[in-house]
Amino acid sequence: MKYFLTSVFFLTTHVIVGYYGVLSVFLGPFNWWTIPALLLLGAVVVATFLLGLVFYHISSQPVSHFHSLPSALLSYVFQYGMLRSGRAGLKKLKVLCGRPREVQEALLRKLLKQNRHTKYGRKYHFAGVVSLTDFGAKHPLTDHDHYHPYIEAVARGEGNVLSAEHPSKITLTSGTTGDAKMVPIGSHSMQTDYVELKGLVEAVSGDTFPDWNIMQRQLWLYTDPTMTESEGGIPMGSLSHIPGWARNLLVIFATPPGGFSIRTTFEATYLHLLFGLRDPGIAVIVAVFASSLLAALRLLEDEWQRITADLAAGTISSRLDLPSGVRQSLERALAGGNPKRARELQREFEAGFEGIIRRLWPDISYIKAIDGANLKSTLSRGYAKGVPVCSNYYGATESIIGLNITPLEEDDEFLLLIDFTVFEFIPEREMSKPNPKTYFIDELDAGQNYEVVVTVHDGLYRYRLGDVVQVTGFYKECPKVKFLYRSGVLLNICGEKMNQSTVYSAVKEAISKLPVEAELIYYAVAESTLLSGSQVNLKECGDNESRPHYIFFLELEYETDSQVEAVLTDISKVIDASLCHRHLAYKLSRGKGELGDPHTQVVPRGSFHQLQGYLLENSSATANQIKIPQKLRTTAMVEFMLQKENQISR
């Protein structure tokens, strides 16, 4: 009602100011101030008319109870602005998909022209490059080591090195498949590309979920990353850090601004859940990764009694380590508590956690989360039953890659964003060659696997991203791809080069063949050679194989009766057989005795999230970056998992 009355106020003001203003200006004498007065009058008349229409539109749809008039107006302008610009961008993208090679050629020429006078551009003669083919002949394929001296110069504050644009941030990669890398990001990427990407995501979401109420708030599971400065004074940290210019846009989320300043995962997640649960009208849940969402829901399952008590009383548990000013501001936002909502929530929690998201938030449209750990089906059968889980886009710290234009499909596939990034592709069979041939956007075949090579605004040229994708089909002439694996997580004890897509399929197949029902939540694999100098005694862990072999760690959902445990003790044999069936090099190495019997350890629930916490404490990555690893790369990581209670090990 308040939005309708506000609309009436502005429209009435529009009429009154317009009527009496015109009379006073045109019936009075013409003075020096007449023209400025007319301009001011026109601005007021237009502004009050537009505000009246906006608030009338707001009043016609469901609006979060926790919006004030200013926050509702800001949310409306931002959300509808994104939706309109995104739909225009999506329409443009679909037109460009009819001529992808032409678009890529034009984008390359634009990037090289912008950066031709940089230190790097002069060295590689950007001014003389006329085409993709020409660029491929004149510039080598690169990895991050190639850029190390240039990025060090950028970090020291030297300008015009890789890009003509001064970097607004030096981002740090997560280090999932190796050491964290520094990647300069300019304001074009931060304020143009990523804003355009958000618009595209909103446009697809609006078309896919027509009942999505954009004036309802969203629940964002965000932990604020620590930021530092380079030697040259450039901000350094995670790409996920919310820049200052975007802080006012947090009104679209349920958590007050203070909750987005928390840098510890437990406290941040607890607060987002607390304020999200306060609002029964949550329309969307946002998490960087599906694993982050699963961790938050497990936290909710463990902490719901404390959270509902806080909600009822309008307090925040003393267990949370928060700055006093942040605690006070957040408790003020709770406005004395909401015992009625707390009782509603308690009834739902006591009824169990299957389908809990839909029961807590009946109006929710969908969940945004990148599903790099294949958790979509697990979530959809449990906590998120009845709520779509969507991976809206595909990207990395170094580059934006693709947009999911069909987010309701079971398998995520992404339309390549050909006007954001220049792409080349290395066939999977040629990835290990010293100078492999690359293929352009119009030279790919459906069903084939390729490593992605990118050239981007911010100074990475013909850069081997390390991601391997499969071309699933085409939209018009533009490829759609699905992510398969990172080349940095290949398993390779004896030269077999087994990728994680093969390993995941083998593990899933093995579990499906068990005569009892069990579901894979997480898995990771390690090479036993990592433990050659370790103090860990594998025999004490139930691993009696002396030859080099693979160690599998599985987190499963399954019944705990003795029959199930007896069956699961044979799971190593089933995984081994499945890998032999799927991967010839593995089978040959096993047959020749080069690889020993695999060892499998089924770890307790929560072990992989504990591993995630361990990695967070021992790396430069932030909570928004850390993924559940599928290959354990260090001795310390393997030792950490071996110390977990070995529920079943053979």
Image (cartoon, grey):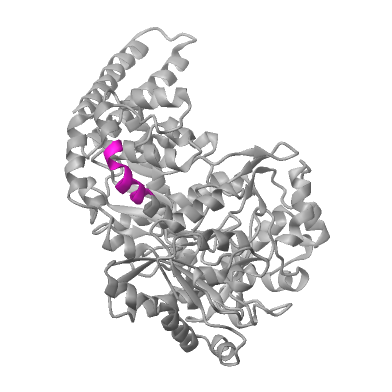
Q: Decide: is 494 above or below 252.
A: below
Relative horizontal placement of residue 535, taking residue 382 as reference (left or right): right
Quarter occupied by residue 272: top left
State how many labels appear. 0
Task: Using the rendered image of the protein, determine whether residue 160 is visible from the camera's viewpoint.
Answer: no
Image quadrant containing the C terminus: bottom left
Q: Decide: is 85 above or below 73.
A: below
Q: Position of residue 228 (x, y in %)?
A: 65, 38
Q: Position of residue 395 (x, y in %)?
A: 52, 59
Residue under the point 55% across and 58% down: 396
Quarter occupied by residue 475: bottom left
Q: Position of residue 618 (x, y in %)?
A: 60, 49
Relative horizontal placement of residue 369, taking residue 484 as reference (left or right): left
Task: Using the rendered image of the protein, determine whether residue 191 is visible from the camera's viewpoint.
Answer: yes
Q: Decide: is 146 above or below 224.
A: below
Q: Decide: is 581 above or below 523.
A: below
Q: Is residue 302 magenta?
A: yes
Front residue of this view, candidates 252 and 359: 359
Q: Position of residue 76 (x, y in %)?
A: 34, 37
Residue extent of the magenta highlight = 296-307
Q: Is residue 537 magenta?
A: no
Residue under the point 33% across and 10% down: 24
Front residue of this view, candidates 364 and 473: 364
Residue under the point 33% across and 69% down: 519
Mainly helix, strand or loop, the magenta region? helix
Residue under the point 49% across and 47% down: 195
Front residue of this view, candidates 578 and 640: 640
